[in-house]
Image (cartoon, grey):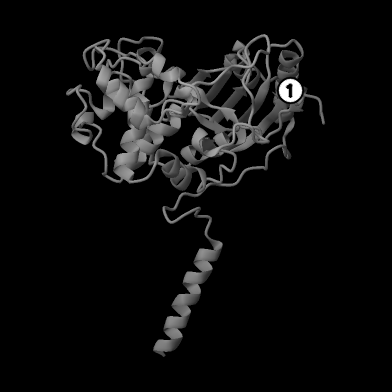
């Protein structure tokens, strides 16, 4: 009897593992959407939206004002996905859905999420000073919370360090950035919690915090805790990719001149995650489903912490629009770095996701309002014609 009971339990455990959608032992799961490039089962309204979006981005590409990849989805359903333009001008390779872009400051969304994952595990106290975790940090009153919401007042290391970045073949680490920054001991721009002041230093420090608390490199933590579980197969930090690899986009300015890198490109947390619109869509969906961090933790991230900002605001790693209106509330982040521009926008009420990534410095990557105009101005369904 005992033997039969044990065998039955083992069989149940085996079947449970086999049928589980859990991506790892942490239990992160994602409802799998359509595969990249495969958009099917659109109704009339959705086809209208998809066609209008295609017309918009084709025109932007043909007029030389957009080169990149786009994905628009609502409630887990991809409405539009397209890659338009050049991956590498020298080789004349075109972009595909697997082409990876430097996310620039959109990386801050992922960094803040990593911190909040550790916060949920009660390994990080957001109210503690950063100095509690790094005793040699000379700015005693700067808290983790103030790093997350850009109210630390710290100087931006991008502007403080100059000659340090331009050493030949130098790839600066976060530890080296920290050492340079501490040795220079730059005067803060503001006293902590005075007002919002955007600074890349905040998120470079948060990457170091994730490393110290987790016992893993920042790259390893993201890979093991986020990218692999969510099957973000084309996402990695700059530390793990070959910049001359097949799917890695090359950055250009407005006139298609290649943009050079420097040592600061290898400092993580504030930037230098490479990804695709589809992978960010998987991340967005996992957030909507509360599979990465809890709903109440996300609410902390989507809270406005700088009341002096009237039209927009900042939470923990997310910029906020319409932050007082639960129906229109939008959380987002844009990025701009060394030839790349990126937009990652999410409207919470209707679970909308808009992702635009570009490897050329043109402002159309930020024109998400044009996408919203199409999404929010669809004619009555009975007036729409069937379209392929």
* Residue 222 seen in the figure: yes
Residue beneath the point at 27% across and 15% down? 153
Q: Is residue 236 left or right of residue 61?
A: left
Corner quadrant of residue 338: top right
* Residue 296 seen in the figure: no
Q: Nearer the viewer, residue 380 or 66?
A: 66
Q: Is residue 98 left or right of residue 347?
A: right
Q: Position of residue 34 (x, y in %)?
A: 66, 42
Q: Position of residue 226 (x, y in %)?
A: 47, 43
Corner quadrant of residue 49: top right
Q: Nearer the viewer, residue 103 or 301?
A: 103
Q: Secondary structure at mark 1?
A: loop
Q: Position of residue 23 (x, y in %)?
A: 50, 53
Q: Is residue 257 above or below residue 233?
A: above
**Quadrant position of the N terminus in the picture:** bottom left
Residue beneath the point at 23% across and 37% down? 125
Q: Is residue 157 left or right of residue 123?
A: right
**Quadrant position of the C terminus in the picture:** top right
Q: Which residue is mark 1?
A: 90
């Amino acid at each position: 009897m005992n033997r039969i009971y044990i065998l039955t339990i083992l069989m149940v455990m085996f079947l449970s593992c086999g049928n589980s959608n859990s991506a790892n032992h942490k239990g992160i799961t994602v409802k799998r959407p359509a595969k990249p490039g495969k958009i099917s089962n659109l109704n009339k309204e959705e086809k209208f939206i998809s066609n209008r979006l295609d017309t918009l981005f084709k025109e932007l590409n043909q007029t030389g004002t957009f080169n990149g990849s786009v994905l628009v989805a609502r409630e887990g359903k991809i409405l539009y996905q397209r890659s338009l333009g050049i991956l590498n001008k020298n080789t004349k390779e075109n972009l595909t859905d697997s082409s990876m872009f430097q996310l620039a400051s959109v990386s801050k969304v992922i960094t803040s999420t990593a911190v909040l994952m550790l916060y949920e595990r009660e390994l990080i106290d957001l109210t503690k000073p950063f100095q509690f975790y790094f005793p040699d940090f000379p700015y005693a009153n700067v808290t983790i919370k103030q790093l997350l919401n850009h109210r630390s007042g710290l100087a931006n290391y991008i502007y403080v360090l100059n000659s340090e970045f331009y050493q030949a073949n130098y790839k600066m680490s976060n530890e080296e950035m920290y050492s340079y920054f501490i040795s220079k001991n730059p005067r803060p721009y503001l006293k902590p919690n005075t007002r919002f002041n955007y600074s890349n230093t905040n998120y470079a420090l948060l990457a170091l915090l994730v490393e110290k608390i987790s016992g893993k490199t920042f790259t390893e933590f993201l890979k093991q805790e986020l990218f692999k579980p969510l099957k973000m197969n084309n996402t990695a930090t700059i530390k793990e990719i070959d910049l001359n690899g097949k799917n890695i986009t090359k950055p250009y300015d407005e006139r298609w001149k290649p943009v050079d890198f420097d040592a600061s490109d290898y400092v993580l947390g504030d930037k230098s995650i490479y990804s695709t619109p589809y992978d960010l869509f998987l991340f967005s969906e996992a957030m909507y489903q509360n599979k990465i961090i809890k709903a109440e933790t996300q609410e902390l991230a989507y809270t406005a912490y700088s009341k002096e900002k009237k039209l927009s605001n900042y939470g923990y790693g997310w910029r906020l629009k319409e932050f007082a209106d639960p129906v229109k509330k939008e959380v987002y982040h844009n990025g701009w770095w060394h030839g790349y521009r990126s937009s990652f926008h999410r409207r919470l009420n209707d679970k909308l996701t808009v992702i635009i990534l570009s490897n050329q410095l043109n402002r159309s990557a930020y024109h998400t309002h044009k996408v919203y105009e199409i999404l929010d101005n669809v004619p009555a369904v009975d007036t729409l014609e069937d379209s392929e």
